[in-house]
Image: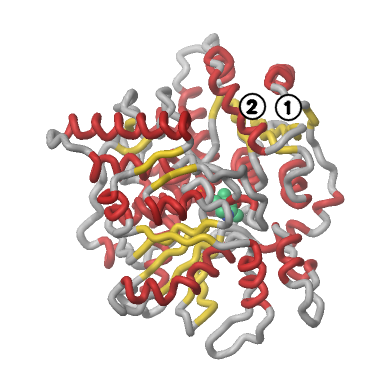
Amino acid sequence: MLYRSTRGKCSNYSFEEAVMAGLASDGGLFIPQEFPKLPDNFLSEWKDKSFSELSFEIISLFVDPSEIPSADLKQIIEKSYSTFTDPDVTPLVQIDKEHDLWILELFHGPTFAFKDVALQFLGNLFEYILIRRNAARKSNDEPIHKLTVVGATSGDTGGAAIYGLRGKDNISVFILHPNNRVSPIQKAQMTTVPDKNIHNVAIDGTFDNCQDIVKALFGMEEFRNKHSLGAINSINWARILAQIVYYFHAYFQLVRAGHSDPKIVFFTPTGNFGDILAGYYAHRLGLPVEKLIVSTNANDILDRFFKTGRYEKGSHGVLETPSPAMDILISSNFERLLWYLAYESETTESDESLKVSEASNIVANWMENLKTHGCIEVKPETLAHSRKIFMSGATDDQKIYQTIKHYYDIESSETKTKYLLDPHTAVGVNIANSLKQTLSSDLGGKSFKSVCLSTAHPSKFVEAVNHSLADITPKFDHNTILPDQFVGILDREQRCTHLPNNNQAVIDFIETTLN
Ligand SMILES: *Cc1c(COP(=O)(O)O)cnc(C)c1O
């Protein structure tokens, strides 16, 4: 399997090259050059597979055994999911029988966020690639292959990346977060990790400032090559790939629970369009899915796109919401979907290779327009085409709080389970309940199961949860939901370097530390 850029200037990259580069050099994102075919009988064949076994089946469709031998890939995958505390890795639980509403819990990894599913895998993959490159050195005079991971985080990515890479030989990790703008638990999660290869940097500025510094460093070719910079942000293809698995896993868990041939609508809380894009790949591979619902908070650029066909930055900046991991202006992974939409609905060429380059040119133009005019618009047919599988919804802060309260401030009954949602998951659940009728008529009255992806454990977002439950009796005590790993974490020693919002300051810090 080879990979090409969505903007057409790079193609025939191997999996390893695409993963190590992160972003293509023409500024585009890597996509597979073909769609692999699932075995004809995969629905019966894969039904009883464990998460890791399923993961191997799916990931190996996109990674040739000549690149990573099957036995090695299996080992990387098993190691990655052995750190999850639930035997099902991503268990599915029903919380509302009346609405046939299910929660796909993706937060049983080391940092209690769904990002662990991808970053545990990516960390082990980086390690494997480096070990192999070093073993292939012809003599000890050749320099040792190293990797310097530099990333920005608004909270969850940093922790998950650090837990994916801590203690790994020849990998140094620098994570930039905005000073005083991540939650105390998130900060402690990142800065209490004692491993020598982990370096936290608090920048005087916003998340966007952090991201701009990281982008500037990646744009400096000499610096990038000298230190072999590696990217862990959600545009890395390996992250999307690892996430495809849990959509299949959800389907098979329903089948195993006795719901044969389940009709599923997935509700995915989304920011950078990574998590939901993985659902799109699952659907394209052949998983039976009725609809994928793009679920946003008040930062609703994606919801507006699926309603109007216009992808346009709002008139205001990023809005701060109770679900901070989804507070974005534009969604970096959306470019991948745009490529498929361009290819299938905007091109005029019929010759395959001409059609591919035409689609890439369309995407390159769109991205240029987005940069210069802050807006792009697809044809009405293209919007209609996307709506065959996608639908969208947006929700506001009040509804997030109300939804958390609704499912917690109840006694469990025949039809409902008392359940504490985190403020990101609550976005999906709120939209699931409000779109129930519309979807029902859209699907011709067919009954369906709503599966909401749960992207974080509620204990990570103390403020939003406390706010939602402020007036319940008996009074809600946050300590009762704290996982063991978080008990006392705020008192542990923190390691973090405080730097001004300045590229050179970060460059100097990285170079001094590496020396
Ligand atoms: C990162 C994150 C999201 C958004 O995921 P995308 O892949 O960017 O759509 C949602 N919820 C939580 C808790 C996250 O950490």
* Image quadrant assignment for residue 2: top left
State whether residue 75 is above or below residue 19. Answer: below
In terms of sequence position, does the residue under pointer 2 or pointer 1 come before the other?
A: 2
Horizontal and vertical percent for residue 442? Answer: 32, 71
User: Quadrant of the image for the C terminus?
Assistant: top right
The three-letter amino acid code for the residue at tag 1 is Asn
State whether residue 21 is above or below residue 81. Answer: above
What secondary structure is found at the residue carrying circle 1? Answer: loop
**Distance between mark 2 and mark 1 Cα atoms:** 8 Å
What secondary structure is found at the residue carrying circle 2? Answer: helix
Mark 1 within 8 Å of ligand 1, using the beta carbon: no
> Which residue is found at the position 55% from the left and 39% from the top?
123
Q: Please report contact status of discs 2 and 1: CB closer than 8 Å, yes or no.
A: yes
* Residue highlighted by disc 2: 213
In the displayed image of the protein, which residue is found farthest to the left? Answer: 351
> Which residue is found at the position 66% from the left and 32% from the top?
210
* Residue 213 can be seen in this image: yes
In the displayed image of the protein, which residue is found farthest to the front? Answer: 315
* Residue highlighted by disc 1: 501
The three-letter amino acid code for the residue at tag 2 is Ile
